[in-house]
Amino acid sequence: MKKTVFITGATSGFGEACAYLYAEKNYNLILNGRRAERLEKIKSKILSNNKNVDIILLPFDVQKKDEVEKSINTLQQQCKSVDVLVNNAGLAIGTTGIQDGLIEDWETMIDTNIKGVLYVTKFTLPLLLKSSCPHIVNVGSIAGKVVYKGGNVYCATKHAVDALSQAMRIDYLDLGIKVSQVLPGAAETEFSIVRYKGDEAKAANVYEGYKPLVAEDVANIIVWVTELPQHVNINELLVMPTAQAAPGIFKKN
């Protein structure tokens, strides 16, 4: 029986790369993101290569609890179960110290990176419990292990994802749900463009002089984690480019 994977933040970066890779492996897909038109393009691209994959699009904002609940509730009529949930939606905004931070930026990061994971997981739980091998993968960050200059609130939210991943592993143990966390280091996606509020020059400068991870690197790891034997669980996997030793510490050309 074909498995179904539900990916949040699937319009770009790790989420989009996961969608293509899971489709290649013949999973049915549930794809979430705020940009509905982008989801449609990804769906068309996947179906042009594989007509046997069923794709459900859920264009909602993970920050909005009522929107999340309403959208996920529609899945009860559209699919029998969710086998893999990839909580990928997340972002960083700004690099200032706390004293200069914008409260609206803090709230966006907290609402997306922490509350979004909680909302999506809670409302997807009934469908996960219908799977014979349910698995949740939370996409964390090196920022969830080490606080770096200018990271403050973003690092705090990713530390929360780390704590929630540990808590889910405890709380869902008797429910038979595997919980993993994948924590990337420097990866070139739209992440820095969002962090620098659209300043592409500043974003590009983040990756100057070394080879960062790309979305496909992280997607390959996420898929590998979810395809291990049922009795094996990767609790957490921290991955960085070879040129990175720690946040802000790189070997550059």
Image: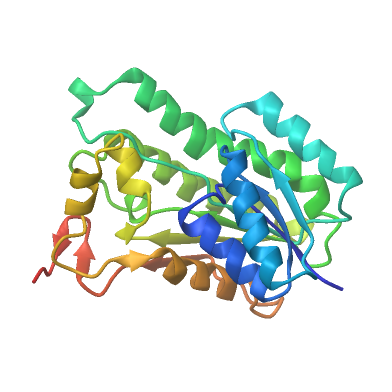
Q: Provide residue 106's location: percent of width, then percent of height.
A: 37, 26
Q: Residue at x 36, y 26 (%)?
A: 105
Q: Residue furthest left?
A: 253
Q: Provide residue 161's location: percent of width, then percent of height.
A: 48, 46
Q: Residue furthest top?
A: 103
197 on left or right of 122: left
Q: Residue at x 24, y 39 (%)?
A: 199
Q: Picture quarter containing residue 75?
A: top right
Q: Residue at x 19, y 31 (%)?
A: 96
Q: Is residue 92 visible?
A: yes
Q: Provide residue 185's location: percent of width, then percent of height.
A: 32, 60
- The N terminus: image quadrant: bottom right
Q: Residue at x 57, y 76 (%)?
A: 224
Q: How is the image coloured?
A: rainbow
Q: Is residue 8 visible?
A: no
Tell which of 30 and 46 is nearer to you. Answer: 46
- The C terminus: image quadrant: bottom left
Q: Provide residue 153's location: percent of width, then percent of height.
A: 33, 34
Q: Residue furthest bottom?
A: 229
Tell which of 61 and 184 is nearer to you. Answer: 61
14 on left or right of 188: right
Q: Picture quarter containing residue 15?
A: bottom right
Q: How many marks?
A: 0
